[in-house]
Image: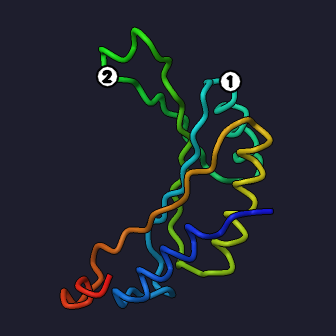
């Protein structure tokens, strides 16, 4: 079973703000892994699907490094409209890949820079 609660929440917020879902915009998708090899495996699978995935180390603060290892992030940035069906399908796929590689799909965000948002809409969130 795949969880789309985060998708629904973001779409609800964007609707309340009056954001256009048809305008192409930058959308970022994120994964988190406990080990670099798991992040690299996910990145490889994503790249085979023509998704330009980048692997980044999530470094702990210096004082935490004594007790905890770094986590690893995989991110994808795409220029696309916020099409509900497409993003829901991507979420399902990304959750499958994350699970297969021993990590977590951490969701997505979209840039609304350049949208003329009505500040009064922020009060209703």
With 85 as the anchor, is 107 left or right in this view? left
Q: Position of residue 59 (x, y in %)?
A: 40, 25
Crowding at dot 1, Cα within 10 Å, few <14 / some 14-19 / many 20+, comes out as few
Residue 121 lies left or right of residue 80; in this view the side is: left
| 32 or 29: nearer the viewer | 32
Number of numbered markers? 2
Q: What residue appears at the point 61 percent right and 24 percent down from the top-left corner?
A: 36
* Residue that badge 2 annotates: 61
What's the distance in space between the residues labelled 1 and 2, CA to CA? 22 Å
Q: At 47% from the left edge and 28% from the top edge, which residue is drawn?
A: 57
Q: Position of residue 64 (x, y in %)?
A: 36, 17
Residue that numbered label 1 is attached to? 37
Helix, strand or loop at mark 2: loop
Position of the C terminus by quadrant: bottom left
Identified at 49% across, 58% down, the residue is 28
Identify whether 57 is placed above or below 107.
Answer: above
State whether residue 79 is above or below residue 62. below
Furthest residue toward top: 66
Q: Tell me what residue is drawn at x 57 percent, y 77 percent.
A: 8
Say which element carries label 1: helix
């Amino acid at each position: 079973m795949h969880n789309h609660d985060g998708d629904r929440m973001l779409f609800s917020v964007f609707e309340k703000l009056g954001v256009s879902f048809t305008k192409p915009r930058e959308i970022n998708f994120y994964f988190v892994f406990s080990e670099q090899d798991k992040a690299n495996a996910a990145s490889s699978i994503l790249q085979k699907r023509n998704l330009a995935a980048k692997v980044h180390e999530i470094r702990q603060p210096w004082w935490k490094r004594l007790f905890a290892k770094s986590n690893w992030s995989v991110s994808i940035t795409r220029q696309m409209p916020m099409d509900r069906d497409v993003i829901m399908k991507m979420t399902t796929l990304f959750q499958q890949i994350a699970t297969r590689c021993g990590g977590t799909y951490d969701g997505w965000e979209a840039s609304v820079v350049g949208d003329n948002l009505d500040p009064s809409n922020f009060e209703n969130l």
